[in-house]
């Protein structure tokens, strides 16, 4: 049970010694951080401390593989830099979904009968026992599935989740694969966030499931442009993007970001309105 497993205070884990599989059932959303912390060493380390009740701690070989099932997509926090979880979503949310896939009551009755009375369990065990796995073919990192990006999006919270909503809504400053840091800061402030600075905004952008890169100048100047009189950084989904690319994509004039009134050009000797 995921809730009980995550809530355990003791370090007693003699059950893990020489076991091949840990099945965590019914993972929820409220205990996702505690569950992650409990599983960290079990997933990552080749050797783990083994401690039984009333026995001295020792170090043992870690053979565990972990399967987590849940009805919630956000039950396990998945970061875009994560390497521990291979995510699989099942497209069966209603009874009609099951029926369309042929997973009827008759199918499950026949499956149970085969398992219980026609050596189904033994057949599956024999197949797994004889399945050939080449030495060195198992990856160190969990495979990236097609559901990985969605999983990282579901795992977002706080400022990063707010910015993702702005991107999906194509708010000003969040269009065409660009994020204007000034817009991001104002958007977060307008939605209740305070005490923001360039670092906190940059950290929120880094957490997004889509990679955004800070645009760099080629002339040695500051990696910023002036928007409405304020210098700001701009982030792009393209690592090679330039400020000229940003201006072209946004339809803005040079050094002018979208969604703000144009600034007068300062021509030497000309009069400019105050």
Image: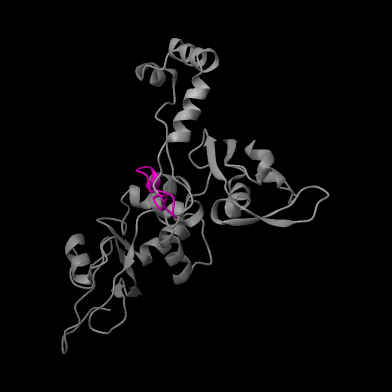
Q: How many numbered circles are shown?
A: 0
Image side of residue 242 versus residue 100, left or right: left
Which portion, as a residue range, is magenta?
135-149
- Using the image, determine if residue 97 lies above or below residue 163: above
In front of the other: 227 or 245: 245
Residue at (53, 35) in percent of width and height: 70
Magenta-colored segment: predominant secondary structure: loop
- Using the image, determine if residue 38 lies above or below residue 28: below
Quarter occupied by the N terminus: top right
Name the spot of residue 222 as percent of width and height, x first.
31, 81
Residue 4 image-quadrant placement = top right
Residue at (18, 84) in percent of width and height: 271
Image side of residue 196 versus residue 169, left or right: right
In front of the other: 122 or 263: 122
Residue furthest toward the top?
A: 106
Name the spot of residue 206 as percent of width and height, x first.
41, 62
Name the spot of residue 179 as percent of width and height, x first.
32, 61
Quarter occupied by the C terminus: bottom left
Residue furthest toward the bottom?
A: 269
Name the spot of residue 47 as percent of width and height, x first.
61, 57
In front of the other: 243 or 103: 103
- Using the image, determine if residue 218 lies above or below residue 188: below
Residue at (59, 49) in percent of width and height: 39
Q: Is residue 46 magenta?
A: no
Residue furthest toward the right?
A: 54
Colour mapping: one colour
Image side of residue 101 versus residue 76, left or right: left
């Amino acid at each position: 049970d995921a809730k009980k497993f995550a809530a355990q205070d003791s370090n007693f884990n003699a059950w893990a010694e020489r076991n091949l599989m840990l099945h965590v059932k019914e993972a929820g959303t409220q205990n996702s951080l505690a569950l992650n912390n409990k599983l960290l060493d079990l997933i990552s380390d080749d050797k783990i401390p083994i401690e039984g009740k009333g026995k001295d701690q020792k170090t043992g070989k870690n053979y565990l593989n972990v399967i987590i099932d849940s009805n919630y997509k956000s039950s396990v926090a998945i970061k875009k830099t994560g390497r521990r979880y291979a995510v699989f979503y099942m497209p069966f949310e209603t009874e009609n979904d099951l029926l369309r896939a042929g997973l009827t009551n008759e199918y499950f009755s026949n499956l149970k009968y085969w398992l219980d009375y026609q050596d189904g369990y033994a057949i599956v065990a024999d197949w797994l026992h004889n399945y050939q796995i080449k030495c060195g073919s198992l990856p160190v990192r969990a495979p990236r599935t097609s559901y990985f990006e969605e999983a990282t999006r579901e795992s977002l919270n706080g400022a990063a989740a707010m910015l993702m909503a702005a991107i999906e809504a194509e708010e000003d400053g969040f269009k065409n694969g660009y994020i204007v840091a000034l817009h991001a800061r104002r958007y977060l402030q307008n939605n209740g966030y305070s005490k923001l600075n360039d670092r906190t905004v940059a950290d929120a952008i880094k957490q997004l499931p889509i990679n955004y890169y800070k645009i760099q100048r080629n002339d040695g100047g500051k990696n910023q442009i002036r928007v409405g009189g304020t210098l700001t950084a701009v982030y792009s989904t393209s690592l090679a993007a330039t400020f000229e690319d940003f201006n072209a994509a946004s339809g803005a004039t040079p050094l002018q970001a979208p969604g703000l009134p144009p600034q007068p050009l300062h021509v030497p000797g000309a009069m400019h309105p105050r």
